[in-house]
Image (cartoon, grey):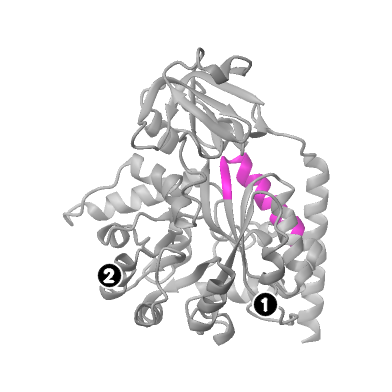
């Protein structure tokens, strides 16, 4: 199928193509075929379905580089959590051991659907509740059934019983991934929280290298993580195939090692500031100072907002506030849109696949209403995307050329049935978690 999106403002996030105040995007099958000011005479557009995007913005889909999707049934259950320890005790030690494979599926599917609804076309699911092979299979199925471009980053649980199948089970997972889902190994920065089994180092790095998969490392925070980063540098374990999540409160020496090695970084703006991780300040100046353009992430929905618009705005506001009087250059709306799209895609190894409206990349794109009450009149498309729009303005979402949201509504999703399933799963986990606590 070929579709021509015509007449709207086009924000490509491709520096060679730039933005078009009025332009066209041609999609053939799963791919972006062409981008230009007028593609109606393009040979591939002869039999295309034409979508009039006048008064709208066509843009790349957002990339969420780190979210613990399995927790979605427990959204905002701890909205005022004050530190990492309280989150760990309530969620990772409290409800996580009570999850069945079905609960993994329900939470992951809910997170992926709501991500799509908010314009996130790529989601890295840091799935750190892989208690069995069945738990991992269920999480992957939750991604695949939604049609999102999913990355399953698999890690064993912090606490409770599990089958000890991780990381060896990634061999099996790698060979049976569904379309649009890729695999990463997930780990923690240090042994402080859950012991040495989950801590990144030579053993896990070698395992990932043998499988030819990349690695995402969470809880990269403070002095202990700075020491770990320098150890990894000496051991040759840093590099582009590694993404460090948070990277908050690291030393200058650790940052120089990250920059020199081309290691990727995923920032979690609302998580750092609201929960108060390490310094509580997203490490954007530190990243840019060593030449790293980070991705952005939602992190934990048990306490935080779920959309990428908020991540962009929080980061923009915090960085520009700190730049006052410090002499640091202020980032721009285009910078944070890049972090949420093309830079995020690069940071998780998908830069050649998605993140910009570049011919030859996959057709992961959004159509955003620019004449709604909160976006009219359209004066600056990038400014509108970052500072004006929100999920209600996303009329259309495509992933790999497939329309997953149309006319402002997710396609083929029974919300009543989804609500019943999510609520039943939440209640069942609560009951089992309560029983475990009582027994203990």
* Quadrant of the frame with the C terminus: bottom right
Residue labelled with disc 2: 256
Of labels 2 and 1, earlier in sequence is: 1
Residue labelled with disc 1: 168
Q: Secondary structure at mark 1?
A: loop
Residue 195 visible somewhere in the drawing: no
Instruction: Look at the numbered discs 2 and 1 and tell me whether their residues touch, using CB distance below 8 Å.
Output: no
> 431 or 247: nearer the eye?
247
> Which one is closest to the eye, mark 2 or mark 1?
1
* Quadrant of the frame with the N terminus: top right
Direction front: furthest residue: 43
Residue density around tag 1, few if under 14, some if 14–19, many if 20 or more, within 10 Å = few
Q: Is residue 89 above or below residue 309?
A: below
Residue depicted at x 53% and y 83%: 203
Q: Is residue 325 above or below residue 357?
A: below
How far across and how far down the image is residue 212, in percent? Answer: 55, 67
How far across and how far down the image is residue 221, in percent? Answer: 42, 73
Q: Is residue 175 above or below residue 336?
A: below
Task: Tell me where residue 174 sits by quadrant.
Answer: bottom right
Residues in magenta?
104-122
> 286 or 240: nearer the eye?
240
Q: Secondary structure at mark 2?
A: helix
How far across and how far down the image is residue 49, in percent? Answer: 64, 18
């Amino acid at each position: 199928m070929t579709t021509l999106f015509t007449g709207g403002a086009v924000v490509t996030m491709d520096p060679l193509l730039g933005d078009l105040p009025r332009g066209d995007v041609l999609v053939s099958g799963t791919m972006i075929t062409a981008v230009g000011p007028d593609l109606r005479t393009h040979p591939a557009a002869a039999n295309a379905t034409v979508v009039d995007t006048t008064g709208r913005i066509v843009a790349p889909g957002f990339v969420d580089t780190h979210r613990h999707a399995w927790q979605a049934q427990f959204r905002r259950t701890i909205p005022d959590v004050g530190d990492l320890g309280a989150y760990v005790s309530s969620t990772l030690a409290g409800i996580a051991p009570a999850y069945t494979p079905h609960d993994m599926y329900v939470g992951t599917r809910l997170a992926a659907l709501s991500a799509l609804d908010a314009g996130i076309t790529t989601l890295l699911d840091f799935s750190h509740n892989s208690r069995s092979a069945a738990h991992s299979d269920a999480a992957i199925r939750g991604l695949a059934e939604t049609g999102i471009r999913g990355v399953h980053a698999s890690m064993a649980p912090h606490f409770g019983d599990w089958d000890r199948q991780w990381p060896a089970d990634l061999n099996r997972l790698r060979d049976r991934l569904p379309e649009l889902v890729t695999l990463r190994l997930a780990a923690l920065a240090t042994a402080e929280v859950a012991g040495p089994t989950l801590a990144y180092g030579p053993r896990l790095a070698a395992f990932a290298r043998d499988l030819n998969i990349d690695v995402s490392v969470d809880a990269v925070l403070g002095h202990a993580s700075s020491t770990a980063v320098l150890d990894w540098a000496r051991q040759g374990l840093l590099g582009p195939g590694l993404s460090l999540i948070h990277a908050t409160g690291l030393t200058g020496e650790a940052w120089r090692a990250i920059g020199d090695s081309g290691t990727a970084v995923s920032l979690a703006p609302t998580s750092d500031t609201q929960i108060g991780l390490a310094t509580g300040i997203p490490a954007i100046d530190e990243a840019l100072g060593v030449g790293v353009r980070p991705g952005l992430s939602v992190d934990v929905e048990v306490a935080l907002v779920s959309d990428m618009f908020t991540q962009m705005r929080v980061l923009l506001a915090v960085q520009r506030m700190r730049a006052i009087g410090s002499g640091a250059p202020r980032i721009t709306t285009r910078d944070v849109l890049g972090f949420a799209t093309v830079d995020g895609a690069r940071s998780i190894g998908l830069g050649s696949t998605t993140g910009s409206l570049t011919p030859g990349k996959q057709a992961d794109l959004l159509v955003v209403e620019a004449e709604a009450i909160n976006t009219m009149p359209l004066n600056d498309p990038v400014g509108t995307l970052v500072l004006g729009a929100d999920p209600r303005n996303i009329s259309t979402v495509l992933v790999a050329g497939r329309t997953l949201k149309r006319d402002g509504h997710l396609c083929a999703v029974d919300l009543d049935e989804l609500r019943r399933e999510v609520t039943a799963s939440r209640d069942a986990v609560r009951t089992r978690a309560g029983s475990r606590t009582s027994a203990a």
